Image (spheres, rainbow, N blue to C red):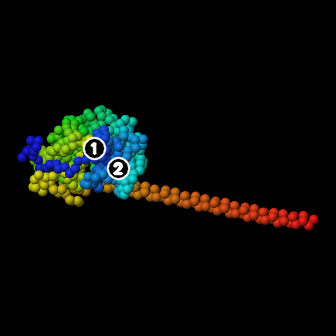
């Protein structure tokens, strides 16, 4: 079988749900704006995406229903030109992180009415902030300029540690989704450096890529410690980052890789190119003679001319693609029933062997004890902060009540004093009236 491009058909294909272009996003205005890219981020639990539209507003959309949920106007004087907003969900609190040229800003959002309030703004770098990466569960944020990386911890009063690039410029960065302080950074000199726990020390591992890396992603679902790196020429390297060995190099994209990830429910690696091509792979059958085999299962045009970002719904086959002044929601669908059965999504709190291989996936991450401890400590910190805030509010209310009571006592004292003076004046007036009458009586008698 062949597809429309003349290529052998593959068992997965894309199916568009809807496409929103500039006029839809800008709420009916005819102005095309500056055609800026939409860097999409997905809420981890709700069917929401967030992005910045034409530097005018930060918008939240429901990607299942294709409607706007809310929007916040961008105040240039307060926020400046902003980019790449991120959802940050911690317990029951929703935050939004955005970056501008040199700063990062954090807002807290009330989800019942979507009112938001700025709670932090800090200057992150003296030169342009290239990107910002948020840890999926802990209170860490990484920002980087071309020459410097900074690791921030907002639970410790935004404490910061810096890493300088000795050669080349920083190009991409990724947190491990489960490890507390495991992250990878790629530089323009084709080096991938991995830090594990120790920030001030040299990287624990350095990998040498064949091409300049544009994006990174850690895999936490499969056998072995895997790191995936997309390149400027459209290839994707799969590494064992602990051993420092390249397991496979994937091809099939027609331009620089703009996004890649391993799906949480399905055993597929997805990647996008800025030319609008989406590809997917899965691990093939184990064969020692062939080594580590990964086979391509999809290569499809998505209808977005220039893909800037891509993110998956964590529990379904939906993908959201961001382009220039447009975004598209698609589904990947199976062309073959047997292939669909072999690659059925996993169920919550379970694992499944996929297509006879050793790849195992679960919807719930198997977080190690250190991660659980960190999450417990963060919950305790949040509880202490809430208790502290309530205590401060209670003290303020008590102080206000005391001040109000003192004002009332002062007012009552003044009123009593005024009444006493009025009575005294009335008594004097009455006495003067009597004395005047007596005087007039004496004068009359004389």
Picture coordinates of residue 146, whole percent (x, y):
32, 35
Count how many numbered circles sit on residues in the image: 2
Q: Does residue 401 appear left or right of residue 228 in this picture?
A: right
**Image quadrant containing the C terminus:** bottom right
Asked if residue 74 can be seen in this view, the reply is yes
Q: What crowding class fits label 2: few (fewer than 14 Cα within 10 Å), some (14-19), or many (20 or more)?
A: some
Say which mark, if any, is on residue 22: 1
Q: Residue at x 27, y 54 (%)?
A: 47
| Badge number at residue 226 | none
- Is label 1 in a helix, a strand or a loop? helix
> Residue 426 lies in what quarter of the image?
bottom right
Residue occupying the far top of the picture? 167
In this image, 197 relative to 15: left or right? right
154 or 432: which is nearer to us?
Answer: 432
| Quarter of the figure with residue 249 | top left
- In the rendered image, is residue 244 in sight? no
**Marked residue nearer the N-terminal end (1 or 2):** 1
Q: Position of residue 129 (x, y in %)?
A: 35, 39
Rendered position, 351 above or below 290: below
Q: Residue at x 39, y 49 (%)?
A: 107
Front residue (pair 107, 418): 418
The image quadrant that residue 35 belongs to is top left
Callout 1 touching callout 2 (CB < 8 Å): no
| Residue with the mark numbered 2 | 71
In the rendering, at what x and y percent does residue 66 appear?
Answer: 26, 52
């Amino acid at each position: 079988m062949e597809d429309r491009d003349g290529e052998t058909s593959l068992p997965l294909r894309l199916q568009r749900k809807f496409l929103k272009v500039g006029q839809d996003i800008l709420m009916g205005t005819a102005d095309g704006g500056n055609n800026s890219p939409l860097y999409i981020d997905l809420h981890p639990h709700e069917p929401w995406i967030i992005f910045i539209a034409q530097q005018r507003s930060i918008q939240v959309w429901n990607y299942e229903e294709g409607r706007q949920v809310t929007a916040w106007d961008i105040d240039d004087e307060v926020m400046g030109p902003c980019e790449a907003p991120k959802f940050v969900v911690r317990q029951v609190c929703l935050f939004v992180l955005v970056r501008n040229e040199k700063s990062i800003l954090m807002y807290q959002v009330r989800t019942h009415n979507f009112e938001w309030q700025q709670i932090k703004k800090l200057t992150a770098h003296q030169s342009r902030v290239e990107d910002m990466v948020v840890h999926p569960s802990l209170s860490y944020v990484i920002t980087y300029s071309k020459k410097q990386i900074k690791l921030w911890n907002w639970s410790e009063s935004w404490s910061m540690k810096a890493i300088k690039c000795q050669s080349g410029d920083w190009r991409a960065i990724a947190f491990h989704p489960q490890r507390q302080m495991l992250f990878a950074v790629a530089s323009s000199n084709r080096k991938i450096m991995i830090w594990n726990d120790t920030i001030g020390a040299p990287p624990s591992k350095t990998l040498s890529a064949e091409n300049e890396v544009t994006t990174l992603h850690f895999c936490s679902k499969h056998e072995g410690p895997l790191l995936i790196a997309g390149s400027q020429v459209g290839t994707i390297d799969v590494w064992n980052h602990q051993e420092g060995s390249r397991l496979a190099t994937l091809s099939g994209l027609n331009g620089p890789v703009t996004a890649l990830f391993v799906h949480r429910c399905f055993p597929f690696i997805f990647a996008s190119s800025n030319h609008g091509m989406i590809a997917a792979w899965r691990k093939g059958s184990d064969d020692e003679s062939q080594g580590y085999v990964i086979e391509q299962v999809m290569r499809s045009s998505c209808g977005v001319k220039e893909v800037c970002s891509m993110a998956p719904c964590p529990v379904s086959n939906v993908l959201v693609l961001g382009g220039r002044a447009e975004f598209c929601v698609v589904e990947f669908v199976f062309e073959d029933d047997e292939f669909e059965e072999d690659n059925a999504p996993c169920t919550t709190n379970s694992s499944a062997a996929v297509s006879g291989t050793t790849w195992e996936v679960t919807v719930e991450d198997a977080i190690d004890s250190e991660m659980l401890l960190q999450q417990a400590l963060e919950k305790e910190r949040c509880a202490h902060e809430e208790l502290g805030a309530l205590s401060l509010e209670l003290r303020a209310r008590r102080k206000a009540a005391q001040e109000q009571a003192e004002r009332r006592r002062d007012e009552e004292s003044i009123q009593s004093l005024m009444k006493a003076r009025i009575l005294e004046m009335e008594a004097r007036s009455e006495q003067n009236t009597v004395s005047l009458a007596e005087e007039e009586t004496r004068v009359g008698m004389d």
